[in-house]
Image: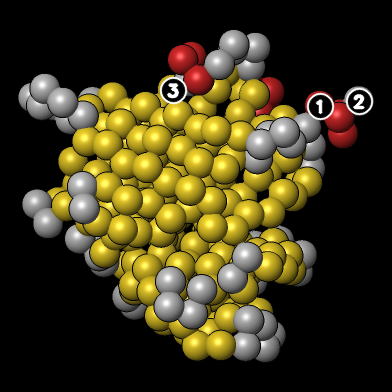
Amino acid sequence: MTEPALSLAFFDPTSQIYGAARSGLTLVFDGTTPTALPSGAEITRTATGYRAGLEDRLELDLEATSEPLFFPGSTVRVCRVTGSAAGRRLEGLGTATETVTPPAWEELDAVRSLSVLFDLDHAVLATARRPRGALGHGQETVTAHVLSPAGVESVEEARLSTLYDGEGRQRSAGLELWMPGQDFPRRGTGRTVAGASLALEGLRVNAAVFAWTMEGREGLGAYDVTVRDEREAA
């Protein structure tokens, strides 16, 4: 059986170091300045979670603190992160994603993935898949979960509205989470802290770090939009 592909994300608001590490590509933000490292990081499992290393550029330990949250083709766990990147120590929150079945891009136009991390006990994670030829977000398949001290709560309906700039990069967003049995949604707002656009094998990835506020809490997370790059295909 093929091992799941691993992808780690990390966010330290104090040092303002953020990023993502995976095989084949590592992206590190030092404040608002992105650095893409195409050699990728070496990621291994440990007794408590995961470890990522890339020469003298990156060394991270992620301790998984949540149970797996299930999404189409993948699972995600919230983690405590320690280590170093961009030449500085960091300590913060992150996520570890294990992908068993990657998106079938012959059937899709776009995939949006979102993490909103407030602390180890409070987080929101969501994915949205837009079928090929769909007219807009209304035809997306959205999966979302809320992490709370009570455990993982499934969201009945999630709505993610986004404002983009002239080049299609996400700049701000609003989030509505309709929970089972509740008459009103939980609402959050987010804005871009840092971002970068990458071209990967016929896809365009607009990767962004977002700062979020929701129900009196403030947090950070990733908001990535991946679309078919028709320009490259042409």
The tag earlier along the polypeptide, 2 or 3, is 3
- Residue at 55% across, 33% down: 163
Is 2 placed above or below 45 here?
above
Question: Which amino acid type is shown beneath numbered disc 1?
Answer: Glu
Residue 209 appears left or right of 65? right
Q: Position of residue 232 (x, y in %)?
A: 87, 34
Few, some or many C-alpha atoms within 10 Å of disc 3 (few <14, some 14-19, many ≥20)? some
Residue 230, numbered label? 1
Question: Which amino acid type is shown beneath numbered disc 2?
Answer: Ala
| Total number of numbered discs in the rendering | 3
Mark 2–mark 1 CB contact (< 8 Å): yes
Q: Which residue is mark 3?
A: 141
Question: Which amino acid type is shown beneath numbered disc 3?
Answer: Thr
Q: Position of residue 77 (x, y in %)?
A: 34, 57
Is any part of residue 5 visible from this angle?
Answer: no
Is 51 placed above or below 135 here?
below
- Residue at 38% across, 51% down: 212
Q: Residue furthest right?
A: 234
The tag earlier along the polypeptide, 3 or 1, is 3
**Distance from the alpha carbon under mark 2 to that under mark 1:** 6 Å
Is any part of residue 39 visible from this angle?
Answer: yes
Q: Which residue is mark 2?
A: 234
Few, some or many C-alpha atoms within 10 Å of disc 2 (few <14, some 14-19, many ≥20)? few
